[in-house]
Image (cartoon, rainbow, N blue to C red):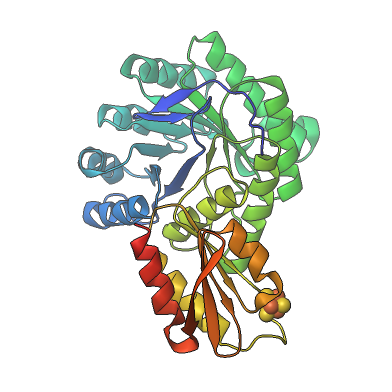
Amino acid sequence: MVERRKTRQINVGGVRIGGDAPIVVQSMTSTKTHEVEKTLEQIDRLHNAGCEIVRVAVPHQEDVEALEDIVKNSPVPIIADIHFAPSYAFLSMEKGVHGIRINPGNIGKEGIVKEIVEEAKTKGIAVRIGVNSGSLEKDLLEKYGYPCAEALAESALRWSDKFEKWGFTNYKVSIKGSDVLENVKANMLFAERTDVPLHIGITEAGMGKKGIIKSSVGIGILLHMGIGDTVRVSLTDDPVIEVETAYEILKSLGLRKKGVDIVACPTCGRIEVDLPKVVKEVEEKLSSVNKPLKVAIMGCVVNAIGEAREADIGLACGRGFAWLFKNGKPVKKVSEEEMAEELLREIERLG
Ligand code: SF4
């Protein structure tokens, strides 16, 4: 069991983050925000995949204008992502967003950040302090020479202290670098000193397999240390894959339950059936099932008994057939041709 760091709880449009709340899964749209229909369509897809908060980029005035419609029609809280233009932070709050994300390092003077925070306080809006290796304050870059973990943590602590001094507590912090080890260290240094909830992720992780592995390692290490109250996997890909990856990471650490957990053997020379075909078919058919369920699909009896004992339902294959297991007990012998269908039928019966 992972023991989570004790953090204070904040609220982003009704979604609780920190404290005893489950670790929240977030993502960010990749559409032009002002293309409202496309943006809402992507938000719906993200929501269907289990995304609980969505961030949208607000780089132009037309994006600010679109926020009202997006917030009104979104099934999940919306966070406006603001860089360089403090005026968009104020306008986004007027349009009803549930949270704003700012990198104080690129917003400008401290006085402006304070005004944004005061407005957020008045309107009951959450703020995320974003500290990224690419937008660190000049003085910290001069002090440390490069955006190392110590510099990132110092920036986050500095802004966190200011928020506290200004009497604002409905905020979380993200410290993100693309280097996994620096990222982990920076989050550890911050987590040691405060109870502020942390939004974790590896920024600019990249595409496909590489991005997923890098994110899983970085996020996984932090989560295993109990650090992280909300997660975003950043991939150069369809954001729905970010959400699916985030859940797989959380599920593998026992931190969230969602959908079917398929345990499948890696196959070896003992295999007598086309197991990858069965696993693929079952995975596809069960991708929309949200009920937490453990399904074991094993190539032979070597590990099948042990895995089946732990699973709700499973298959242990032999030569051209499989035993169907339910709650650890073999209940039926099925042929290779019908094993996927039979398994799916039994899962349906489980409700
Ligand atoms: Fe090989 Fe059987 Fe293990 Fe699958 S369960 S990897 S077929 S020994």
Q: Residue furthest right?
A: 144
Q: Nearer the viewer, residue 193 or 300?
A: 300
What's the residue at 66%, 76% (across, down)? 301
Q: Based on the displayed image, in which of its 4 quarters is residue 57 positioned?
A: top left
* Residue in the foreground of this view, choosing between 166 and 286: 286
* Quadrant assignment, res 192: top right
The answer to which quarter of the image holds residue 206 is bottom right
Residue in front for this viewpoint, 282 or 120: 282
Residue 211 seen by the camera? no
Residue drawn at point x = 55 percent, y = 64 percent: 329
| Residue 186 shows in this picture | yes
Q: Where is 166 relative to 12, above or below? A: above
Which x, y percent locates residue 175?
A: 62, 37
Ligand 1's quadrant is: bottom right
Residue at 69% over, 70% down: 303
Q: Position of residue 320 (x, y in %)?
A: 55, 90
> Residue 322: percent from the left, percent from the top?
54, 80
Q: Give the number of marks.
A: 0
The C terminus sits in image quarter: bottom left
Q: Is residue 74 above or below residue 237?
A: above
Question: Height in image: 342 above or below 197?
Answer: below
Name the image quarter holding the N terminus: top right
Front-most of 219 and 42? 219
Residue 238 % position (x, y): 43, 62
